[in-house]
Image (cartoon, rainbow, N blue to C red):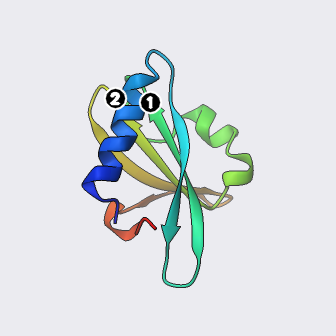
Amino acid sequence: MIPAAVREAIASHARAELPNEACGLLLLDGDRDVEQAVVHSHVSSPPRPSRTDVERIGLWRDLPYVIYSVRLDELAAWRIGADGIESLPIESLPVV
């Protein structure tokens, strides 16, 4: 789960970085292992991976990719992999 305080920290950081996009990392405690998630903001577009996000996923391929939309005040999570883009429910991402 991404607690309200963490969500607000993501939103606050994204607003502070305007007019630029913000980025960071979260540590996620899954059922088996702890893994990192990328946190990234979009200034005005919806919280969905952009073409640039997909093309430049690099080392973050197959890891949770959390996007916050500043304009819409929405948070969404994705997994971008070789097989495509998969939506992840925010509730399934337990933050350490």
Disc 1/disc 2 C-alpha distance (Å): 6 Å
Res. 37 image quadrant: bottom right
Label 1 with label 2: CB-CB less than 8 Å:
yes
Picture quarter with the N terminus:
bottom left
- Residue at point 74% right, 52% down? 59
Res. 61 image quadrant: bottom right
Q: Is residue 27 above or below residue 6?
A: below
Q: Is residue 68 above or below residue 87?
A: above
Q: Which residue is mark 1?
A: 42
Q: Is residue 78 above or below residue 31?
A: above
Q: Is residue 78 left or right of residue 8?
A: right
Residue 8: % across, % down? 30, 43
Q: Nearer the viewer, residue 53 or 91?
A: 91
Which residue appears farthest toward the right when viewing the image? 58
Tell me, for residue 70, which label it has, or none.
Answer: 2
Q: Amino acid at mark 1?
A: His
The local crowd at label 1, few if under 14, some if 14 to 19, many if 20 or more residues have their Cα within 10 Å, is many
Residue 16: % across, % down? 41, 24
Residue 50: % across, % down? 53, 35
Q: Amino acid at mark 2?
A: Val
Q: Secondary structure at mark 1?
A: strand
Tell me, for residue 91, which label it has, or none.
Answer: none
